[in-house]
Image (cartoon, rainbow, N blue to C red):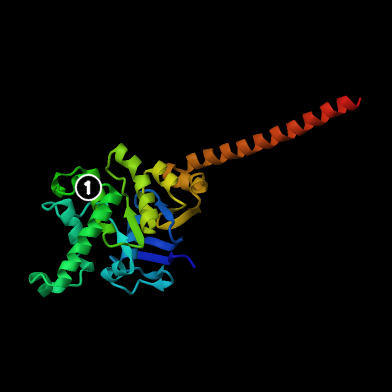
């Protein structure tokens, strides 16, 4: 049994089927890429996993437990964490304060304990500040700790949003296009950062991304959605060469050209090998004469 699974997922909005018969799995500690053209149903699938919409049928299993009956905050409590395509931070407070706000669900002191600064509240605050320092070190946000969110570049905002998510120590992280809208230098740093998060926190990552070099170099397994269905899955190199994936992105003609090129390459390789064996035999025969 996989650490995380989506089984037989179907999502429908009236007469429009957004996802159908979707099966997906991730082993603990894997980085799994989810690709597909715009409108393929990737973010819709994330919304169902995180509890924002209710599917018609299917299961979402975390360590064998079906979490679909749980409310979004209960899924977060089980370790499901998610970022969105649009950054959602408090613009008028600092990055460090945003991280502390993100941690509030882990605080147990209560209103009165915080108002009167009781020992439990002080302990919660020390824990939150320690966690924020640790997360900022992982994401390399210390230079921006006291900067207001409204003063940051879009790329730094995305890193701050990811840091807020990490404050909750998620076991399953859903990232919706983390490289979207950020500079090339920041994109290049994103791959090592996600590996560092996986290695340091032991998290499993499910990643929607349109940056093909990034997702193919980063992922252990890749799934491709088109028109709401999984059309290919497997190692990145295998999915990248799949004619159905090429067709989904570039059209049928490009897929047919790819198939022809692969067939020609395979045929040429066989002919070359046969010629090599034939030539080798004739030379040997000459020496016997």
| Quadrant housing the C terminus | top right
Q: Position of residue 41 (x, y in %)?
A: 36, 56
Mark 1: few/some/many CA within 10 Å (<14, 14-19, 20+): some
Residue placed at 49% from the left, 53% from the top? 232
- The residue most toward the left is 116
Regarding residue 40, the answer to whether it shows in the image is: no
**274 vs 196, nearest the viewer:** 196
**176 vs 43, nearest the viewer:** 176
Q: Quadrant of residue 172?
A: bottom left
Q: Position of residue 20 (x, y in %)?
A: 42, 62
Vertical arrangement, residue 125 with respect to residue 34, above or below: below
Vertical arrangement, residue 90 with respect to residue 265, above or below: below
Residue placed at 61% from the left, 39% from the top? 263
Q: Which residue is mark 1?
A: 142
Regarding residue 81, the answer to whether it shows in the image is: yes
Instruction: Tell whether 275 sits left or right of 55.
Output: right
**172 vs 71, nearest the viewer:** 172
Vertical arrangement, residue 36 with respect to residue 79, above or below: above
Q: Position of residue 57 (x, y in %)?
A: 39, 70
User: Which secondary structure, mark 1?
Assistant: helix
- The residue most toward the right is 289
**124 vs 166, nearest the viewer:** 124
Instruction: Tell whether 276 sits left or right of 5.
Output: right
Q: Position of residue 252 (x, y in %)?
A: 48, 43
Q: Quadrant of residue 271?
A: top right
Residue placed at 31% from the left, 69% from the top? 75
Q: Quadrant of residue 31?
A: bottom left
């Amino acid at each position: 049994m996989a650490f995380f699974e989506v089984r037989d997922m179907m999502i429908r909005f009236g007469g429009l089927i957004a996802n159908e018969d979707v099966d997906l799995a991730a082993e603990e500690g894997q980085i799994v890429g989810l690709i597909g053209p715009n409108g393929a149903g990737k973010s819709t699938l994330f919304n169902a996993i995180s509890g924002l919409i209710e599917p018609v049928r299917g299961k979402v299993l975390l360590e064998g437990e079906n979490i679909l009956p749980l409310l979004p905050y209960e899924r977060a409590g089980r370790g499901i964490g998610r970022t969105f395509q649009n950054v959602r931070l408090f613009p008028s407070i600092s990055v460090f304060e945003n991280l502390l706000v993100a941690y509030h669900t882990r605080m147990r002191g209560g209103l009165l304990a915080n108002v009167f600064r009781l020992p439990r509240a002080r302990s919660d605050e020390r824990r939150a500040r320690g966690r924020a320092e640790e997360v900022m070190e992982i994401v390399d946000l210390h230079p921006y700790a006291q900067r207001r969110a409204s003063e940051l570049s879009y790329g730094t905002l995305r890193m701050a949003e990811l840091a807020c998510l990490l404050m909750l120590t998620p076991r399953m992280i859903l990232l919706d296009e983390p490289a979207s809208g950020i500079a090339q230098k920041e994109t290049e740093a994103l791959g090592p950062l996600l590996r560092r998060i996986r290695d340091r926190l032991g998290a499993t990552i499910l990643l929607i991304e349109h940056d093909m070099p990034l997702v193919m170099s980063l992922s252990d397994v890749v799934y491709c959605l088109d028109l709401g269905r999984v059309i290919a899955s497997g190692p990145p190199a295998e999915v990248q060469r799949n004619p159905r994936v090429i067709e989904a992105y570039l059209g049928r003609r490009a897929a047919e050209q790819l198939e022809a090129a692969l067939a020609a390459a395979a045929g040429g390789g066989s002919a070359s090998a046969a010629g090599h064996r034939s030539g080798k035999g004739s030379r040997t025969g000459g020496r016997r004469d």
